[in-house]
Amino acid sequence: MESTPGHESQTPPPPSSTDGLPSTSPTSKNLKQKVVSAKNALEDAGMLPKIHPVPWSTFFVLLVFVSVPPVAFTFAFSSMGKGEEYIAAHDTERESRASAMKMGIGGSLLVLYLSDFTYWKSSFAKSVRAFVLCCVVVMMTIWLLASARTMPSGLILIFSLGTVLWFVSMKHIFYYDVIFRDYVAWIVGPMFAASVTLLVVWVIWISSDVENAWNVETKVRYAKVFDWDMQLMEQDFIDKNMKSCMANATNASSFPTCIPDVPTNNTYFTDDCPAFCADMYNGCQVAFLVWSTPFIVSLVMLFLSFMCAFLNPQSSGSAPTTFGKRRFS
């Protein structure tokens, strides 16, 4: 019907869905608002890092990037992967390699110090200095890897520093023309997701089998596999309990105890050899670190995500919508 002078035509009602309801349900809107509000509250309380919104394609690509170091390290040096075999393969050749690396590190740093390397100005001298420092880093890495049995915390140091170098390398390779603080903002969410995912997988793993859980049997098994030096036992334990735990020794090692080399019915202990004898392995820190490596790696990734969020409270730009667009276009 045509409108007459002095009367306005009425606007037709908005289209509705086939079931008579609006296209967007108010319930879903309220739920989304509640989720966003909860996320913001957790971020303001410091319980979550401030995650910069990025397209899902970019998020998953960055998630793959940031997951490479924790997955590779967990597989190589934890009990979920090949860590038990790596530590058990300790031999005299590895010890000699570690000693050679320590001598090389000390000698290189001494030569640089005596040569006043901080005052080298020519391009050739700077190149020599950079080469020597790179060699020191490589030798230090080899030394820590070779000393994993006696100094297992060195592996965590390698992972922490190596992960940072990996993130920087990925930035210069694929997002070289992106502002650094923008790149830091984009990887906060993927790092947090990788940390939580690894933690969940580790919890599922230790819950799937009693042999994966940390208990006295696990501690003894790892210590025996790693051929832990019994001379490193805590003196307090030796003074109080060694006589009772040495009684009825069942193994023929150079430091025999009542704990057998092979468990019976999934346990090493009997009435004649009580469970407190496992305390002699309390000094075997490498056993616990190999078992808890996925948890430690998850904490490192969580710390890095919070650190990146702290260093970059706000990003100056938006994330790329397609992987490789900035690098290869």
Image (cartoon, rainbow, N blue to C red):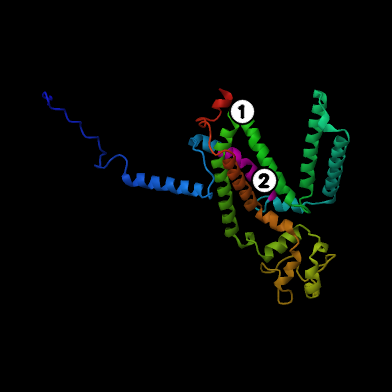
| Location of the C terminus (image quadrant) | top right
Queried whether the magenta region covers residue 194, the answer comes back as: no
Q: Residue placed at 66% from the left, 37% from the top? A: 166
Q: Position of residue 235 (x, y in %)?
A: 81, 67
Mark 1 or 2, nearer chain start:
2
Quarter of the figure with residue 163: top right
- By secondary structure, the bulk of the magenta-drawn segment is best described as helix
Quarter of the figure with residue 237: bottom right
Find out whether the residues at labels 1 and 2 contact each other: C-beta distance under 8 Å.
no
User: In the shown orientation, is residue 202 left or right of residue 154?
Assistant: left
| Location of the N terminus (image quadrant) | top left
Q: Residue placed at 76% from the left, 42% from the top? A: 141
Relative to 211, does residue 1 appear above or below in the rendering? above
Are there few (<14), some (14-19), or many (20+) residues within 10 Å of tag 2? many
User: In the shown orientation, is residue 202 left or right of residue 125?
Assistant: left
The residue identified by callout 1 is 176
Q: Residue placed at 60% from the left, 43% from the top? A: 307
Q: Residue furthest left?
A: 4
As shown in the figure, which amino acid type bears the numbered disc 1? Tyr
Relative to 89, does residue 216 appear above or below in the rendering? below
| Of residues 182 and 172, the one drawn nearer to the viewer in this rendering | 182
Span shown in magenta:
62-77
Quarter of the figure with residue 119: top right
Q: Residue furthest bottom?
A: 271
The residue identified by callout 2 is 73
